[in-house]
Image (cartoon, rainbow, N blue to C red):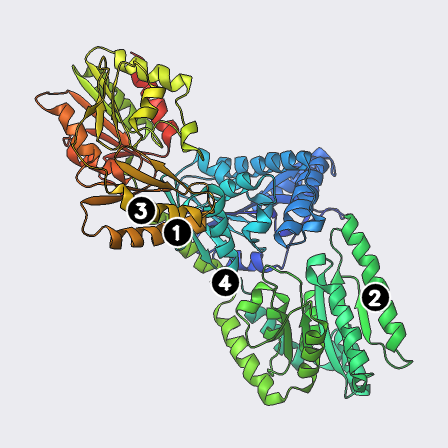
Amino acid sequence: MQKLLIVSNRLPVNVDTTGDEIRIIPSVGGLATGMSSVSGSYRNLWIGWSGLTKGQTDEKTEKAIEKELIAENYLPLHLTQEDLDGFYFGFSNRTIWPLFHYFTQYVQYDDNDWETYQRVNRIYADAILSAACDEDMIWIHDYQLMLVPQMVKEQKPDMKIGFFLHIPFPSFEIFRILPWRKEIIEGLLGADLLGFHTFDYQRHFLSTVRRLLGLEVNFNEITYGHRIIKTDIFPMGIDYEKFHGAALEQKARAVKDKTKVQQEMEKYILTNPEIKLVISIDRLDYSKGIEKRLQAIDYFLDHHPEYLEKITLIMITVPSRSEVPQYKQMKSEVDELVGRINGKFGTINWTPIWYFYRSFPFEELVDLYSTSDIALVTPNRDGMNLVAKEFVATKTDKKGVLILSEMAGAAREMAEAILVNPNNMKELSDAILTACEMGVEEMILRNTQLQDRLQRYDVKKWASEFLKALTKATDNRPVLGGTKITPQVETEIISQYRKADTRILFLDYDGTLVGFKNNPMKASPDEELMQTLEALASQANTELVLISGRDKETFDQWFPGKPFSMVTEHGVWSKKPGQEEWKLLEYISSDWKMLVRPVLEFFADRTPGTFIEEKNYSLVWHYRNTDQELGLQRAIELKDELNSLLSNFNLEIMEGNKVIEVKNSGINKGKAAARFLRNKEYGFILAAGDDWTDEYLFQELPNETISIKIGAAKTRARYSYADFRNMRNLLNQLATE
């Protein structure tokens, strides 16, 4: 059976070594529940840190723990305290966490933490590679492991890899602050499917991919080398039946069987029948808006004194990252705020805020949810927030009101809640008043719709839908760029080349032999490329033709007196070895430039970073240096303008890699290449190019031509390479007799 490898920062278990025996205690989190729901379809193996650092136990105990975990289908990774300090407490929680939650003032940039993050991600990647077979599926979770997908994909390119981000993905303007932004994005792009909670997070990610790497994005798909990477939205749910069922059980219990928490709350309600209980549960974190929530309670009681002694906030704050300075300071501020509010409004018989700095077991948590009248869930920024969903699930009588921050991912699914801006004190206060005064019929209507949705799309459905999408994305991978050249295919091409009596090679330049540059004039050939081209051209019975959209003046400057032929401006000019002058292949006019140039200048003037290149018989508008999204928008507008302007002229609009070129129609690389084949027979023909102007070349050449497309796109070429470096490697091998 196919294995599903689940990879997360930590295993969903706690290891208890206090007694005589080692106890493996499963966690009760949503992720663990979701994964267990798909175990019938796969053999699950969960990879992650065990929770114990190296040296925390003796070697014998460590091996015993590992044996116990492996028996339960867990593969524990062994991290040192140094690993945790740099990888988890450092880069993950002092750099990524605040940045992705828009708290840029807390972000720390530490090269040592980054190096540790890379090293620990490599530990996780190596564990996957050692445990997985090619047919297995890999599901990697969250921001601690964003480099792992690419690390695995580099070694196992056909492996099915999914990645889910459980926190927000920030806007490009925020993400671009990160010094290691490119490495993070490239790490994520090792996945075949990237999942996000909301459309906003997906949109931010796709915008970043476009603007940072300049990759082609089509709806929710990213073209990256030979691959199409899919992104999609999977709002994580909860185990609805577990929470709803527990709330029903709690109601049916006899008084003596109820938890102490429930007994105390019922006693309190009995003595204060008009009281409104407001529940607030969070991890201690600056992203949760705890201080602003307390300030809103202060504001509410100040402006609505009629609710003094009639409302109580039960605030549960779970300790988190207590060793981080910001969290220590926040704990002190929260303690002070709670004390001040209770001192300001409290009486002998009433305390406005019941403050608990600890976690609660599941049964007591359900009691708190089901007994409370209002849930106040107002984070400043939250990837999803499952507390909101858990509260609604426990409302078995459908009575209760959810006040939810617009900044939580859950707000996209829970429009029936009272949605608020957590930074607006008056709006928060008004929401509390609305919740206190809401009628039963309206509560039932809102909660019925919420519960129906939560029940349909629970955590099990979430996990199942993601894995279905990953299977679809990998089983139906589109074939782009012809047949991918494997080492075996490459060996066969080299063999054919060496056996042939006569050979000719047609090579595009930009994107095929060199990478694209922001300034096209800086893409001159390096010494290694020049040596390779000269070596190829010097081989017996071998002809080499550089066939490019470049102008002849540039090629004269870069390749003076070289032993190979050159064709420029897509087939307008030709020059063979030994010739002093260029030969005009097509007799054409350039009078049309007076009409087209003002249009291109108009678009260049209002699109910063773009410029016009003039060739002898064409005009080119370059938009590589502008904002990617703006450039794409302007390119569409320019093509529309040119199409209407040039409908009666014998001109052609060509779209290359971040360029729009206008030239005379009927001139192309294919016609120019055909001239070299007239009255000649070659035992080996190779043609390589990267954009659609090279499709004319592939179309005109004989069927037996070794035609190679560089990059991912639909093509007439027989074969493809991911990028120009692969092509350079092949040419280096051909140049070596």
Dot 2 or dot 1: first in sequence order is: 2
Q: Is residue 167 left or right of residue 132?
A: right
Mark 1, residue position: 634
Mark 4, residue position: 460
Secondary element type, mark 4: helix
* Contact (Cβ within 8 Å) of mark 4 with mark 3: no
Residue 500: give x, y in percent of width and height: 18, 17
Q: Nearer the viewer, mark 3 or mark 2?
A: 2
- Residue nearest the observer in this picture, 40 or 530: 530
Residue positioned 67% across, 81% down in the render: 435
Q: Please tell me in which quadrant of the rendered image residue 301 appears.
A: bottom right
Q: Which mark is residue 337?
A: 2
Q: Nearer the viewer, mark 2 or mark 1?
A: 1
Secondary element type, mark 2: helix
* Contact (Cβ within 8 Å) of mark 2 with mark 1: no
Residue type, label 2: Leu
Q: CA distance from mark 2 to mark 1?
A: 52 Å
Q: CA distance from mark 1 to mark 4?
A: 44 Å
Q: What is the quadrant of the C terminus in the image?
A: top left
- Residue nearest the observer in this picture, 90 or 587: 587
Q: Badge 1: how crowded within 10 Å, few (<14), some, or many (20+)?
A: some
Q: Badge 3: how crowded within 10 Å, few (<14), some, or many (20+)?
A: some
Residue 306: give x, y in percent of width and height: 80, 87
Dot 1 or dot 4: first in sequence order is: 4
Q: CA distance from mark 4 to mark 3?
A: 29 Å
Q: Badge 4: how crowded within 10 Å, few (<14), some, or many (20+)?
A: many
Mark 3, residue position: 478
- Residue nearest the observer in this picture, 650 or 148: 650
Is residue 1 in view? no
Q: CA distance from mark 1 to mark 3?
A: 29 Å
Residue type, label 4: Lys
